[in-house]
Image (spheres, grey):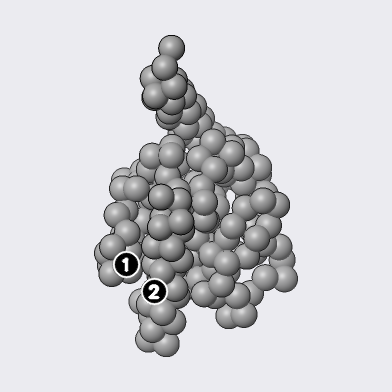
Amino acid sequence: MDSAYMAIEDLKDSSEQLENLAGGIRRCVACRLHESRRHAVPGEGPVNAEIMVLGEGPGGKEDAAGRPFVGPAGRYLDTLLRGQGIARDRLFITNCVKCRPPNNRTPRRDELKTCTNLWLERQLELISPKVIVLLGQVAARQMLGDTATVSDLHGTTQPRNGRSYFVTYHPAAALRFDWIAATLQEDFEILGKLLARSTDSSQ
Ligand code: URA
Ligand code: SF4
């Protein structure tokens, strides 16, 4: 069997595994957030995505649609990505918790722990992205530890356990504060250059 054929078979196999995870997420009742959700939001994107974008948790629009970042914060994210020529459909976009917290409250520690261990870790293992973009404090603390602060780390890449994390603010915060919008724009410019460089060196 030739290796190109095997690579395609592997890709099909891991896409299927990613889809199985999504099915498990849609049925998950492992934490209290399942009680008030309309739709769990597994995330979306190809299994061979080089970039994963990690938000906090679904909001109202996402809960209604079952898809990540489709509300106002999502439109803002789309604009930032477009500005750097990054195609959204090449990323894997997901959240720390897959079900919407009631009234968009911050996810609790036990909910974050359960959901990350059950689902996010498995998505990360399958996709194995080159860089994981952490949007906001909840995602930053979940992946980098309780002392991580976005105001110190934004615009930088942080290595942890063989993975590479790029830290920035949450686009929802940029909709409230102009100074965050400006900083987020600068951070995405840094990210855009970083990605352009990593594609150059892999050719
Ligand atoms: N905010 C998030 O953190 N995630 C979404 O999917 C939408 C808004
Ligand atoms: Fe399961 Fe995560 Fe939803 Fe909790 S938030 S019910 S752990 S999918």
Outermost bottom residue: 179
Image coordinates of residue 8 in percent, x first then y, are 39, 24
Q: Residue at x 62, y 80 (%)?
A: 152
Image coordinates of residue 40 in percent, x first then y, are 44, 41
Q: Residue at x 29, y 54 (%)?
A: 87
Front residue (pair 96, 39) = 96
Query: What amino acid type should be assigned to the residue bearing mark 2?
Result: Glu
| Secondary element type, mark 1 | loop
Front residue (pair 23, 8) = 8
Q: Earlier in the sequence, mark 1 or mark 2?
A: 1
Q: Residues within 10 Å of mark 2 (few under 14, many from 20)?
A: some
Residue linked to disc 1 = 84
| Secondary element type, mark 2 | helix
In the rendered image, the vertical position of residue 63 relative to residue 6, given as above or below: below
Whether tag 1 and tag 2 are in contact, CB under 8 A, the answer is: yes
Front residue (pair 73, 181) = 181
Query: What amino acid type should be assigned to the residue bearing mark 1?
Result: Gln
Residue 189 numbered tag? 2
Image coordinates of residue 24 in percent, x first then y, are 51, 30
